[in-house]
Image (cartoon, rainbow, N blue to C red):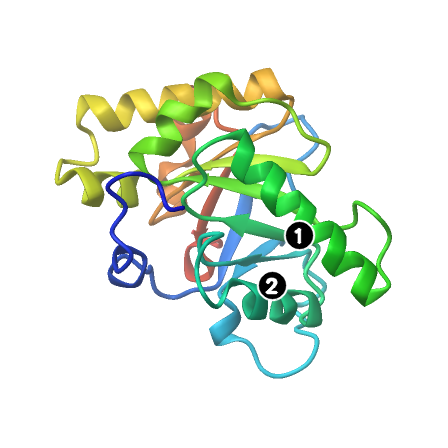
Amino acid sequence: MPPPGHDAGADDRLTLAPRLFRFRGLRAGEAPAFPAGAAVLDPDDAPAGPFGVQGATLYVRLPPLDAEDFPARLARAVSLGACGIVLPGTAGSPDIERLAARLAVAEAEAGLADGALRIVASIDHPAGVFGLAALRPHPRLAGLLCDPARLAARLACRPDAPAILQARGLTVLAASACGVPAILTADSAMEAQAAGEEGFAALLVPEASVAA
C-alpha cells in the first residue's frame, strides 16, 4: 500500500520537466557515483524500442510499487534497455525488497543476468524519511536519492525548512551506512558545491543544466 497520507495524484502534479535527467558527480579525485552521462528517464518520454542516450547508462523512473500500471511500466523500462529503476515513494527496506523480487522476475523473462537491474530509492515522502533509520544494505541498491522539492511540496513548506534539511542529512547518513552514494535532486548544477559540502556524492539535474 502507499505510505500513510500519500496522495495518489501528487506524483502527477509534482512531475518535473524536462523528464530526462543526468547524474553529475561532485567529488573531485574520486570515482564518480555513476558512469559519465548516466541518465534518468520517464518512460512516457521515450520512443518505441531501446532508447540510446548517447551511450549513457539508463535508469527509468517508475510509479510507486502499488500503482496499477506498475507491471506495464516495468516491462517498458526493460524494453528500453534500462540498467536500473528509480523508485519514487520508497518507504524503507520492504519496498526495496519487493521491487528486487519483481526485478528478478523481469530479468528472467528478458533473459538478463540475475542482479543486472539496480535500484535507486527516491526519498520524496515523509514516510521514506522515517524509514531511513532502519534501511538495510541490499545488493541491488545503487543509491539513495533525496528529492527536496517533492518533500517540500508534500509538507507545504519551504525547500530550506528544518524538516527538509533534516531529510537531506538523514539521506546522506543512510547512504553511507548502506555503502551507496547519496544523490540530491536539484533544479540546477549551480547547487553542486553546497551539495558536495553536505556529503552528497552526485546531483540529479535536468539535462539542460549538466553543462552549467
**Residue lying furthest bottom in this view?**
48
**Alpha carbon distance from label 1 to label 2:** 9 Å
Amino acid under disc 2: Leu
Q: Within 10 Å of the Cα at label 1, are there few (<14), some (14-19), or many (20+) other Cα atoms?
A: some
Q: Within 10 Å of the Cα at label 2, are there few (<14), some (14-19), or many (20+) other Cα atoms?
A: many
Q: Secondary structure at mark 1?
A: helix
In percent of the image, x 29 and y 56: which residue is there? 8
Tell me: residue 94, above or below residue 185: above
According to the picture, the residue beneath numbered tag 1 turns out to be: 102
The quadrant in which residue 39 appears is bottom right
Q: Which mark is residue 50?
A: none
Question: Is any part of residue 89 visible from this angle?
Answer: yes
In percent of the image, x 48 and y 63: which residue is there? 20
* Total numbered labels placed on residues in the image: 2
Q: Secondary structure at mark 2?
A: helix
Tell me: residue 1, above or below residue 191: below
Rendered location of residue 134, percent (x, y): 49, 18
Q: Do the residues bearing badges 1 and 2 touch, measured as CB atoms within 8 Å?
A: yes
Rendered location of residue 204, percent (x, y): 47, 46
According to the picture, the residue beneath numbered tag 2 turns out to be: 74
Give whichever of discs 1 and 2 has the lower sequence position: 2
**Residue lying furthest front in this view?**
1
Question: Is any part of residue 53 visible from this angle?
Answer: no
In percent of the image, x 48 and y 54: which residue is there? 211
The one of 172 and 188 positioned closer to us in this rendering? 172
Rendered location of residue 140, percent (x, y): 70, 38
In percent of the image, x 21 and y 36: which residue is there? 159
Name the side, left or right, on which 93 lies relative to 164: right
